[in-house]
Amino acid sequence: MKAQAIDWFKERLGVDAIREVMDHKTVPVHSATRWYYFGGITLFLFGIQVVTGTLLLFYYRPTVAEGFDSVRFIMTRADFGWLIRSIHSWSANLLIFVAFVHMFSVVFTHAYRSPRELTWGSGIALAGLMLGFGFSGYLLPWNQISYFATKVGTDVAGSVPVVGVAIARILRGGEDVGAATLTRFFALHVMVLPMITAALIALHVLLVQKNGMSTPPWIAASRVRHMKFFPNFFLREVMVWYGVLAILGALAAIFPWELGEKADPFASAPKGIRPEWYFLAQFYTLKLIPSHVWIFEGELLGIAGFGAVALAWALLPAWGVNRAGQARTRLVTGAGIVLVAYLAVFTVLGYVK
Amino acid sequence: MLSWLLGGGALASMASFFYPVARFLIPPPVTEAAVNEVAAGKVQDLKPNSGKIVKFGNKPALLVRVNDTEWKAFSAVCTHLNCTVQYRDSTQQIWCACHNGTYDMSGRVVSGPPPNPLEEYAVNLRGDEVVISKRA
Ligand code: HEM
Ligand code: FES
């Protein structure tokens, strides 16, 4: 009876075909295998964001009048509200950090080579989406710091030549950051970005599945041992997830996320205005560039520079390989090191200055 | 021919879906009466060598009482990236906390990234009332 029922489901769900795929998936074992865990950690943290974000929706109200107070309600009145919000905030930060580790591990192990160009491209798009999540979510508690950070951030978009003013208007829902901006960012944060991200993650993971895990060029592929994905690698990954969850819980419990003061459009920008750490490097760069460089406005120059670097980075699979399709390891590793160094140094400088 | 018709039809129907969506996303203009003058409070409410932010229409303005008799007012919107500036009594300058821009008491940029001076407004005292207005 029980066996019959199981068979009934197996047949209709095509379980055998899925098991077949699962059985054949393997992971190469070598000195860089540990970096294979980071994509999975990113995925796990994204899942945490979906769960905690949905919970926050039960109390959060996306209006200028109530936004701040509804978050305070979550922090002080709703049972475990502080925990849920703190986990959502901490996890967002860890997610972006881990996604960057994942990205740079792909760079330094040269996994962007053919046939994984689209995996790289979808990953870059995901990284952009994660920054979009961070930027839009930051405004939602409607406090002083996030209010001014959003003013600055949308104004950066607004200073792009020709289309900038229109972009800034569409982002803000008007001339200035206000009630219309909050509802827009809310719609983006809880609906538009999650839908696009879910679709892109599906594509990204599907491509990883289809192309298999790459082995770094300095390791002879024929000599590498493989372990089965199910259950060997998967169980290890789950252990890592538990570890990440423990870190997350500890951070949220020991350092609950702060709320700050309610935004007041008619107050001066407070001291210590700064964006989230993952925009700090750019923020500090903008601070350093003088107002005019030769005949150009300094800020425009900075933005053009960021745009050019981002574009070159997205096109890495094009310039990172030679005609024979082999990775230009020195060039790419060098570019990767320069970028990591720039981001690290400027983030720290932006923090201390 | 057939595929051309089908493709064209599909494209046209796509356009008819996306056009209203795009238009919907562009915020409609909000008509606001242009403000040329505001009452910014009483003379005795602001100590010499201090400043405060007041509403000038829907934008912030900075009113500074330089000393007993001298008053200044500026648009408080930093010309760099839109933050709201403040008066610093220690240096007697206008300071923007966002990227450390400073302006002097004529609105000119002294240091930091702002590309342009702050727009200066006229200040008039009517009895004990301070009135800020756009310069003609
Ligand atoms: C939301 C963010 C992301 C998620 C959830 C995610 C998820 C994953 C997962 C689960 C894997 C398989 C395990 C692994 O190789 O670590 C993977 C592989 C990969 N990811 Fe991502 N990823 C994200 C962002 C990125 C970014 C930012 C990049 C780089 C631009 C990227 C590029 C790649 C590449 C090229 C692979 C294949 C690695 C190989 O085959 O050796 N991903 N990703
Ligand atoms: S916004 Fe004022 S200095 Fe940048």
Image (spheres, rainbow, N blue to C red):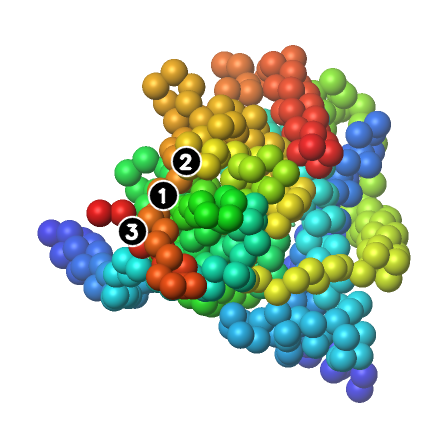
Query: Can residue A31 be seen?
Result: yes
Q: CA distance from mark 1 to mark 3?
A: 8 Å
Q: Which residue is mark 1?
A: B120
Which residue: 66% across, 28% down?
Answer: A346
Q: Which residue is mark 3?
A: B134
Q: Name the chain letter of the residue that bears numbered label 2.
A: B
Q: Residues within 10 Å of mark 3 (few under 14, many from 20)?
A: some
Asked if the residues shown at circle 3 and circle 2 are in contact, with their CB atoms under 8 angstroms apart, the answer is no
Same chain for the residues under marks 1 and 3 in the image: yes
Report the amino acid beneath label 3: Lys
Q: Is residue A208 above or below residue A258?
A: above
Secondary structure of residue under mark 2: loop
Which residue: 71% across, 58% down?
Answer: A89
Q: Which residue is mark 2?
A: B106
Image quarter of the C terminus of chain A: top right
Q: Name the chain letter of the residue that bears numbered label 1.
A: B
Same chain for the residues under marks 3 and 2 in the image: yes
Asked if the residues shown at circle 1 and circle 2 are in contact, with their CB atoms under 8 angstroms apart, the answer is yes
Q: Is residue B48 above or below residue A120?
A: below
**3 or 2: tag closer to the N-terminus:** 2
Q: Nearer the viewer, residue A295 or A14?
A: A295
Secondary structure of residue under mark 1: strand
| Residue A205 on image: x %, y % | 62, 49
Which residue: 43% across, 63% down?
Answer: B128
